[in-house]
Amino acid sequence: MANESNLELIANVAEALGDLRERFVFVGGCATGLLITDPAAAPVRATRDVDAIVAVVSLADYQGLSEQLRARGFSQTLEEGEPPYRWTLSGMKLDVMPTADEILGFSNRWYAQAMQTANVVELRRGRGV
């Protein structure tokens, strides 16, 4: 069962991303409720951030993506304790993980498959993620 606050958070982040959201696949705790089909399943716990993966092939591509995020009002604090992939906007936290491990020095072997097999889900009228 989806957690309404998680869905609202994803929808708000997707709206803030605008057309850039089409490059992202939302994963992690915030997206878990979108994958559960059993109505008797235990509720998904609330989370405070949105995890997303994005296909980038080079550092230049990642820098271009960073510029696009900044143009939409997202920023990185890079404060101690904050991960290097965290972007914030109006209190929302978006963790952007590139599929290429060369960008941040790590990746996950499932990112590429998740990008290839992602489904679009409509959260708000006309707004698919």
Image: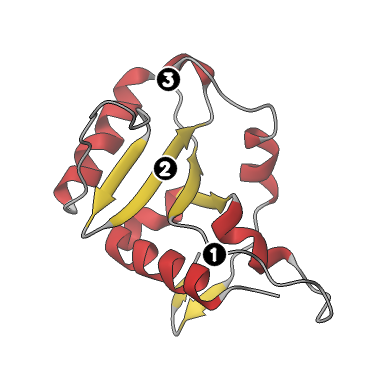
Q: Earlier in the sequence, mark 3 or mark 1?
A: 1
Q: Nearer the viewer, residue 44 or 9?
A: 44
Q: Nearer the viewer, mark 3 or mark 1?
A: 1
Q: Amino acid at mark 3?
A: Leu
Q: Give the x, y percent position of residue 66.
A: 26, 36
Up the image or down, 42 lies above or below 58; here it is below
Q: Are marks 1 and 2 in contact (CB under 8 Å)?
A: no
Up the image or down, 48 lies above or below 57; here it is below
The quarter of the picture where residue 46 lies is: bottom right
Q: Earlier in the sequence, mark 3 or mark 2?
A: 2
- Distance from the alpha carbon under mark 3 to that under mark 2: 12 Å
Q: Nearer the viewer, residue 67 or 12?
A: 12
Residue 46 numbered tag: 1
Label 1 neighbourhood size at 10 Å, few (<14), some (14-19), many (20+)?
some
The quarter of the picture where residue 16 lies is: bottom left
Q: Give the x, y percent position of residue 79.
A: 23, 29
The residue where tag 3 is placed is 104
Image side of residue 87 versus residue 1, left or right: left
Residue at 47% from the left image edge and 14% from the top image edge: 105
Q: Nearer the viewer, mark 1 or mark 2?
A: 1
Residue at 49% from the left image edge and 47% from the top image edge: 51
